[in-house]
Image (tube, helix red, strand yellow):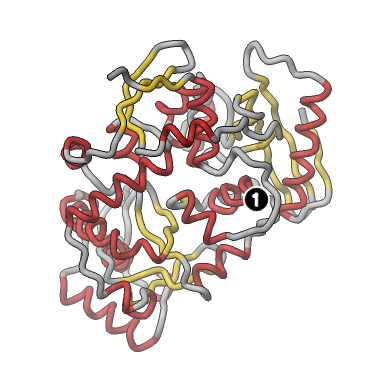
Amino acid sequence: MSRLRITNRQARHLWLHSQGLGDTPTGKLDVLGQIERLGFVQLDSIQVVSRAHHHILWSRNQNYREPMLDKVLAKDRGVFEHFTHDASVLPMQFLPMWQRQFQRKRQQMENYNWVRGLPDAVERQKIKDRIGAEGALSTKAFDTKIEGPKEMWSRPPHKLALDFMWYAGELATCHRVNFTKFYDLAERVFPSHLQQVEMPDQDQVDWLCHGALDRMSFGSLGDIQRFWDAVSRSEVQDWAKNTATLHEVEIETFDGAWVLALAPKDIGSRIEKLTPPTSRLRILNPFDPVIRDRDRLKRLFGFEYRVEMFVPAAKRIWGYYVYPILEGDRFVGRIELKADRRASELRVLKLWPESKTRWSAARDEKLQSELHRMARFIGVTQVVWQC
């Protein structure tokens, strides 16, 4: 039987719709539903315009505003924080399938060189006892110091202990204040009926692999492994060998090559129902899930991108925090922006159209509209061009 072939255009449309960027970003807002659809939303502390997690949600529904995620986390307990490929928020209902990740991260933390100063179990228990008695605490409530020379990723002992117990699932993020994390006992944050679910490890692997593939519509073994970063490559390989409902497909890349991939059992009906993505132009965050897997991004869209926040200024190709510009199913440029809330301005520092992209008056008007929508999102009144 010949494999189903998915053209590059179909692949781009499938991927954008799967990740919530296929539809016009308007209508009824369901923050938790959107996170469930994505699987997780990456957290990031950098706020050049809006922090990554807020921007990612706003890109999918522009009725979103920044305080909404805090409510879902701190009041509704609809999500919890933990580590996928990076710090993220995940739907609370995923907790039973995340037990293996708590264990994996505990083991990894025990092997990391930077935890040499980790307080022992007795000292960690003292911290837990204090949180138990006083309630949720941030790192500012402790005053241990780094001993010896300070290196880039050095942490004081109390911070190592808090993070270790957070990774291991003993502590959980209760809420944040100006992005400062407050740690509480896991049993006071995680619902008991979810904590008590005992799911066999292989069932967790099965759920994670199916969940990744469902949210991508198609992917290589590496794509599936990298999605949550909660399973190993060998575990994905074993899962694929033992799952009869998967389809082997061929995906056309941006440059016309064909590569093998796996797809869920309903891939045929997904293609039949496929519609072109909205032609609306959107400024995406550098940590958007459609952007973060650089190999997949280049393979499908021919768009090369890297984040340069930690690259010395003299070695940057683009700039400190540069946003990709998506229009329909194409990346048509990138833009460097900065917000000055005190001056109530969204500043445009640089704009780079992609090569072979004609920057027409119509496209420019779309960009202007998006910039003004973004200004309203962050609560400033003016868009100021400085380039």
At 75% across and 40% down in the image, what residue appears?
A: 371
Q: What is the x, y in percent for residue 4?
A: 37, 22
Is residue 50 or residue 180 the one in the foreground?
Answer: 50
Q: Report the amino acid beneath label 1.
A: Asn
For the N terminus, the quadrant is: top left
Is residue 16 or residue 244 the one in the foreground?
Answer: 244
Is 236 on the left or on the right of 70, as rendered?
Answer: left
Is 348 on the left or on the right of 163, as rendered?
Answer: right
Q: Secondary structure at mark 1?
A: loop
Within the image, what quadrant is residue 159 found in? bottom left
Q: What is the x, y in percent for residue 255?
A: 47, 11
Q: What is the x, y in percent for residue 26?
A: 70, 49
Q: Which residue is mark 1?
A: 61
Is 152 on the left or on the right of 301, as rendered?
Answer: left
At 64% across and 24% down in the image, what residue appears?
A: 333
Q: Is residue 367 visible?
A: yes
**Above or below for 156 versus 215:** below
**Above or below for 27 versus 366:** below
Is residue 334 or residue 256 the one in the foreground?
Answer: 256
Number of callouts: 1
At 27% across and 71% down in the image, what residue appears?
A: 170
Is 211 on the left or on the right of 43, as rendered?
Answer: left
For the C terminus, the quadrant is: top right
Q: What is the x, y in percent for residue 355?
A: 63, 13
Within the image, what quadrant is residue 253 found in? top left
Mark 1, other Cα within 10 Å: few <14 / some 14–19 / many ≥20 = many
Q: Is residue 152 visible?
A: no
At 67% across and 36% down in the image, what residue appears?
A: 282
Is residue 351 or residue 7 the one in the foreground?
Answer: 7
